[in-house]
Amino acid sequence: MRVRYIVLLLALGSLAYLLLWPTGLNFPKHSFEKPPPLSGALLPNTALNDLATLGTVGDGPEDLAITSDGTIYTGIANGTLYKKSPSDKDWQAITLTYGRPLGLAFDPTERWLYIADAMNGLMRTDKQGHLERLIDSLDGKDLGLVDDLAVADGGIVYFTTATTEWGWDEANDAILVGNPTGKLMRYNVRTKQLDVLIDDMFFANGVALTPDGQAVLVAETGSYSIKRYGLIGRDSGRVSTFAKNLPGFPDGLNYDADGKLWVSLPSPRIAMAERLSDQPFWRQAAYKLPEQFKPRPERYGFLIALNADGQVVESLHGPDGKYALMTNVVWRSDTAYIGSLMERSIGVYTRSL
């Protein structure tokens, strides 16, 4: 009898903790459209099953940048930046950020590799590994989780802070809580001017300049959408939605040579997260669950391509999940090089001729 009583008390205590114990966090109410059906251009396939790789580089090569001579650069969880030329057998370390490099992008001259470091802000290095921290604060406060970037002519860098509340390894909790503290920012390296272009984003992520230079696009991971910020003429400063109701969580954004915008989806949309999106009370309860019971990304390879109107025109799937949590893709001719936040290598997909 005593054992049953103790078990009952423990069960009631656990239930009270899940339902009533405050977290001190803000859980806004969100409302999203029903996910699009996986049909037409989204019809599942096996294109990303059994990917080739470029050999082990280390934990979480989240992004990559490729120079005109074919040398690939990436960064991993321990802060090391690596490069590998077409003639190299192994990856070569070039520098250490002492943080967590996420987004990578060369300037148009390929002199500087710019780095969105989740812990140290906006940085850059030359090809010899001479590292420079550019900016790590806004109005005297830490920038937060600096995530991705795109570099224009004249030392203009567009970059995101995904959240000011969570670390790079807490993205799942940041999206579950859903407090929109993300930002799209612009930094002028020459004048050292920092401007906030879009504020209050629900986990701001991948960044891409449109091929015509008229706008910058930014993935809003938590809302399954991509925002557009105008840069030219009467459109300058105008924020609009480029794509919405995507079939997964958008991360990295990169254009291919044909002008299609490729979006990396680390996971399809999660049914449990969908059900909880407009229920802050139950989302708070889910947040307090042990990690194995919280909504988690699905191991599923997923890349989609959008046209200039933001419509899905192609998708590549890897339902076997052998290479998962795809966060960026860079195309060179018919070959896609794919980064991941959890794998230990760069994935390689080549179209069949």
Image: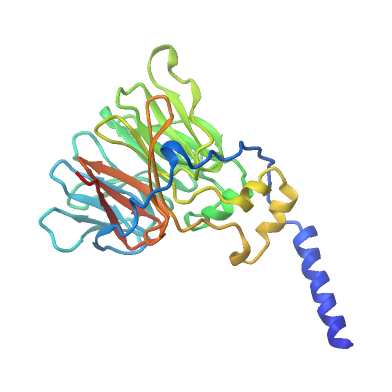
In percent of the image, x 28 and y 35: which residue is there? 256
In percent of the image, x 50 and y 24: which residue is there? 240
* 252 relative position to 275: left or right: left
Picture layout, residue 133 above or below residue 323: above
Question: Where does residue 43 sit, x and y in percent of width and height?
Answer: 43, 43
In the foreground, 142 or 160: 160
Residue 19 lies in what quarter of the image?
Answer: bottom right
Task: State the quadrant of the N terminus.
Answer: bottom right
**From this viewpoint, which residue is outermost toward the right?**
1
Question: Where does residue 249 sit, x and y in percent of width and height?
Answer: 49, 45
In percent of the image, x 77 and y 64: which residue is there? 17
Picture layout, residue 139 above or below residue 309: below
Picture layout, residue 127 above or below residue 322: above
Q: State whether residue 318 appears in this view.
A: yes
In the foreground, 156 or 102: 102
The image's colour scheme reads rainbow
Question: Where does residue 159 sit, x and y in percent of width and height?
Answer: 40, 38
In the foreground, 9 or 34: 34
**From this viewpoint, which residue is outermost toward the top?**
234
Task: State the quadrant of the C terminus.
Answer: top left
Question: Where does residue 211 sit, x and y in percent of width and height?
Answer: 30, 26
Q: State whether residue 115 appears in this view.
A: no
**From this viewpoint, which residue is outermost toward the left?**
87
